[in-house]
Image (cartoon, rainbow, N blue to C red):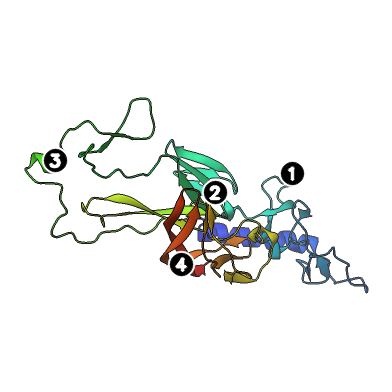
Amino acid sequence: MLTAECLLLFVALSQQISAQLCPSQCTCSWAPARCPPGVPLLLDGCGCCKICARRLGEPCNKIYLCDQTQELVCDYSTSKDGGRSGTCNYNDGDSCDVDGKVYQDGETFQPSCKLQCKCEDGGVTCVPLCSEDVQLPTPTCPFPRRVTVSGKCCPQWRCDGHPSSLETEGLTQTAPINCPEWNTEWGACSALCGMGISSRVTNQNPYCRLESQHRLCMVRPCGAPSAATGITACKPTLVSSHPIRWETQDCISIRTFWPTFCGSCGRRHCVPYQTVNELVAFQCTAGLRMKLMMFIVSCVC
């Protein structure tokens, strides 16, 4: 963390460098600068003349400034002249720090054999690599249990007939009389675009046992305008411009919907803030299926 003394020294050095680069009097061309499409005009670092903002990869310094509408900053880390000049680059704030290791924006990594994660706009989205299926008791398998198998990352279901602790204590596996509802929060959608899956843990089942519950989700359709295009307007929520049918694997929803999706704010993707669940009827290859679907009410950036 910068101390007050270091901060004052940094400001003093910046002012000294700017003073050395700036002319004593402003002398600007009478003709305004002609910038490439999408590149804004701005005052130079001396506050004298209108110049074209420097773009990604272009040289920059205290006078020739980077395009802030693209969230570019002048990166002096590779400077070879004592920090007088640098290169326009994206802010390092989009990198991700996970357990002390820094991952760059867009980088995919596995923090464990059970998860695959991706750094995206400073946030981390993870997809489970192990199946989260739940096996409920059946007459042929009254006491299913998940066990760790040597040499395998993901736990495996076993049905070896051994009674559970409830059976050992003389209790039965019938539905409990008193089962206070307990749920975790719904997890993030497994896909940044297109159809994904969101999960939570709940005890709302006939045996009052903790199990994973899944719902289909779509934060935004793939092919929608990306937050990386440099659009500065913040649009947290966007309503579909046309009715759509939900599609997943070999299933398609029977009716159409006008869903709400999450937009972007600058280069940052917005994420769902308020959601509701609804059972949706799907026509699948194997017949009619009812699937739990997440619907977005509002988003936050």
Q: Does residue 43 show up?
A: no
- Can you tell which mark lies on residue 119? 2
CB under 8 Å between discs 2 and 4: no
- Dot 1 or dot 4: first in sequence order is 1
Q: Is residue 118 above or below residue 179?
A: above
Residue 133, placed above or below residue 148 = below
- Mark 1–mark 3 distance (CA, rounded to whole Å): 68 Å
Amino acid under disc 2: Cys
Q: Secondary structure at mark 3?
A: helix
Task: State left or right for residue 225 relative to residue 98.
Answer: right
Mark 4 highlights which residue?
273
Quadrant of the rendered image containing residue 290: bottom left
Of circles 2 and 4, which is in front?
A: 4
Question: Within the image, what quadrant is residue 46 found in?
Answer: bottom right
Is residue 10 in view from this perspective? yes
Please state which amino acid type lies under the numbered disc 1. Lys
Disc 2 from disc 1: Cα separation: 30 Å
Q: Which residue is mark 3?
A: 165
Kind of residue at disc 3? Ser
Marks 2 & 1, CB-CB < 8 Å contact: no
Measured as percent of width and height from the top left, residue 153 is found at 39, 32
Which residue is more in the foreground, 69 or 156?
Answer: 156
- Tell which circle, 2 or 4, labels the residue nearer the N-terminal end: 2
- Which mark sits nearer the N-terminus, 1 or 3? 1
Residues 216 and 22: in front is 216
Secondary structure at badge 4 equals strand
In terms of depth relative to the viewer, which is nearer, 107 or 20? 107
